[in-house]
Image (tube, rainbow, N blue to C red):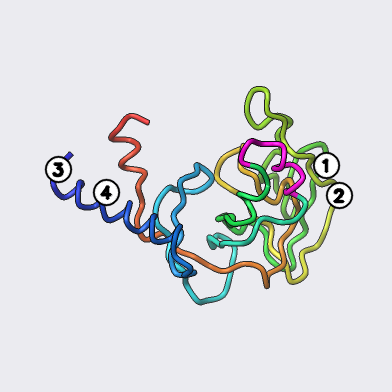
Amino acid sequence: MTAGRNLLTTAMAAGCVLSVVGTTDALVCNVTDSLPTGLYARTFGAVHRGSVVRTPMPEPMYAYLARFPVGAAFFRSHDLLKEVSGVPGDTVCEHDGMVSINGRLVATAMRDIKPGVSAPAAWEGCATLDDAVFLLGHTPDSLDSRYFGSVPLSAVRPYTLVWNTQWARAESGR
């Protein structure tokens, strides 16, 4: 690793620590595979399809998460970072685990997130989004709207990726 990459990695780590221990809403560090890993900064603009947003974990997920060792209490203090896939006016449907937006298949709800770990029950039916957004991660095992439904537009805050660490994973072989 070069000196420049060492500095970059140190700065990224410092930003992640500040985003976790600070009370600011300005920065958030994503370490999951749901979106590119890295440091995201709060933006102030309209939320649109493709926006990355931060939102508190929706209530229906707490009962599911309570069964894990860290428990639901951990997740109450950690917001979700997801991409907006459905916007007001869109029709979102889920039938038999198949999620579509405006008639186009966009995701599949999994029965098991990982071997031996069942997924939360997916919501079923169709809804036209009104003052709400439908959030999806980039991976099939992402805990997102395919399991908890839409999220009120008033509950999301837009963010943008300012420091991508995907290269660090690729370089380390992870």
Q: Amino acid at mark 3?
A: Thr
Write down the region rendered in magenta: 61-70
Q: Amino acid at mark 2?
A: Gly
Q: Residue 56: horizontal and vertical position, in percent?
A: 64, 60
When asked about the image quadrant of residue 171, the answer is: top left
Q: Residue at x 73, y 62 (%)?
A: 90
N-terminal of the pair, mark 1 or mark 2, is 1
Q: Residues within 10 Å of mark 1 (few under 14, many from 20)?
A: some
Q: Residue 170: horizontal and vertical position, in percent?
A: 33, 35
Q: Residue at x 61, y 37 (%)?
A: 140
Q: Is residue 157 above or below residue 79?
A: below
In contact (CB < 8 Å): disc 3 and disc 2: no
Q: Amino acid at mark 1?
A: His
N-terminal of the pair, mark 1 or mark 4, is 4
Residue at mark 1: 95
Residue that extends furthest to the left in the rendered view of this protein: 3
Q: Is residue 71 above or below residue 7?
A: above
In contact (CB < 8 Å): disc 1 and disc 4: no
Q: Is residue 22 magenta?
A: no
Distance from the alpha carbon under mark 1 to that under mark 4: 43 Å
Assign a secondary structure to mark 3.
Answer: loop
**Given this view, does label 1 or label 3 mark the residue nearer the observer?**
3
The N terminus appears in which quarter of the rendering? top left
N-terminal of the pair, mark 1 or mark 3, is 3
N-terminal of the pair, mark 4 or mark 2, is 4
Residue at mark 2: 125
N-terminal of the pair, mark 3 or mark 2, is 3
Work out whether residue 56 or residue 99 is closer to the camera in this orientation and state it: 56
Residue at mark 4: 9
Residue at mark 3: 2
Q: Residues within 10 Å of mark 2 (few under 14, many from 20)?
A: few
Q: Residues within 10 Å of mark 4 (few under 14, many from 20)?
A: some
